[in-house]
Image: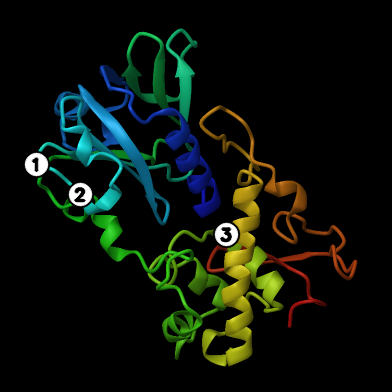
Amino acid sequence: MPELPEVETVRRGLNQLTPKHKITGGDVLLDRTIAYPFSAEEFLNGIKEREIISWHRRGKYLIAELTSALEDKETRGQGDKVKNSSSSSLGVHLRMTGQLLWLDRDEPLHKHTRVRLFFGEEWELRFVDQRTFGQMWWVPPQVETQSIITGLAKLAADPFSTEFTVEYLANKLKNRRRAIKTALLDQSVVAGIGNIYADEALFLSGIRPETLCINLQVEQIERLHSSIIKVLQTSIEAGGTTFSNFLNVKGVNGNYAHVAWVYNRTGQPCRVCSHPIERIKLAGRSSHFCPQCQN
């Protein structure tokens, strides 16, 4: 599943390619990909003839601010501060296998293509999703985004937000009798982290994945806080992680897998101490760790 670095990589790519392009039409090939409105026709009619101002990320969600191509240019580029009566939003969640690809309109259709958004006669933004769990939303003008994309309201602080402090993380973990690895996967604890970067952050902070939150010391939480930010930044710089199907908007793999500390490296030597990396199951999810470096 694409996690924060992969979604952020896609966001940056989209912001380089799509702004000031008008959506001239589209095609929905799998109706259930559209979470709102409940009619594919209404979805396409809602976004048609609107331009993309910019893309934002909230946890693993992507949100594009849209506006009519005729809207006063003075309101553009002000991000979340301005939402005119004619502006609306396009939301996307990639879920497990979703890809947003910026392609030439003549590019042959992949068999897992679910939605196509056309930008003139030359380009399109194509949503490809093998497992079909990905979703898209159109939020009409003057409607609160969270009222339509309801998952946004459940998200905790983003690791790159000013809200995400050591004190914030400590308070979220306080008195929890659950494994720290499981807690980090909870989007109400910290937004955007999944299996890959939970393992990586725990390695960097020297904490075993099965350690109960209630048993963590202050200095461990401090290390974990900085490790979360560090590993996410490193992966974003590498363009995310591709173990199976993640691609950026230009169809390029992420490179973080080549430098991962523990994730998906069962039996391989630890990059620090050379002890073989081990794997255990926690709440049905694989956890990779070094038993010598993490305690």
The percent position of residue 144, horizontal first and vertical second, equals 15, 52
User: What residue sits 85% from the left and 68% below the top?
Assistant: 272
Is there any visible trace of residue 111 in the rendered image? no
User: How far is the residue under mark 3 from the one under mark 1?
Assistant: 40 Å
Query: Label 2: which residue?
Result: 82
Label 1 crowd (10 A; few <14 / some 14-19 / many >=20): few
Task: Report the side of 253 relative to 42 (left or right).
Answer: right
Query: Label 1: which residue?
Result: 85
Asked which quadrant contains residue 164, the reply is bottom left
User: What residue sits 41% from the left and 57% below the top?
Assistant: 59
Q: Amino acid at mark 2?
A: Val
The percent position of residue 220, horizontal first and vertical second, equals 63, 85
Task: Report the side of 226 relative to 39 (left or right).
Answer: right
Please tell me which residue lies in front, 187 or 24: 24
Residue at the outermost front position: 74
Please tell me which residue lies in front, 295 or 124: 124
| Rendered view: 7 above or below 146 | above
Please tell me which residue lies in front, 285 or 187: 187
Asked which quadrant contains residue 54, the reply is top left
The percent position of residue 282, horizontal first and vertical second, equals 58, 69
Q: Quadrant of the C terminus?
A: bottom right
Q: Earlier in the sequence, mark 3 or mark 1?
A: 1
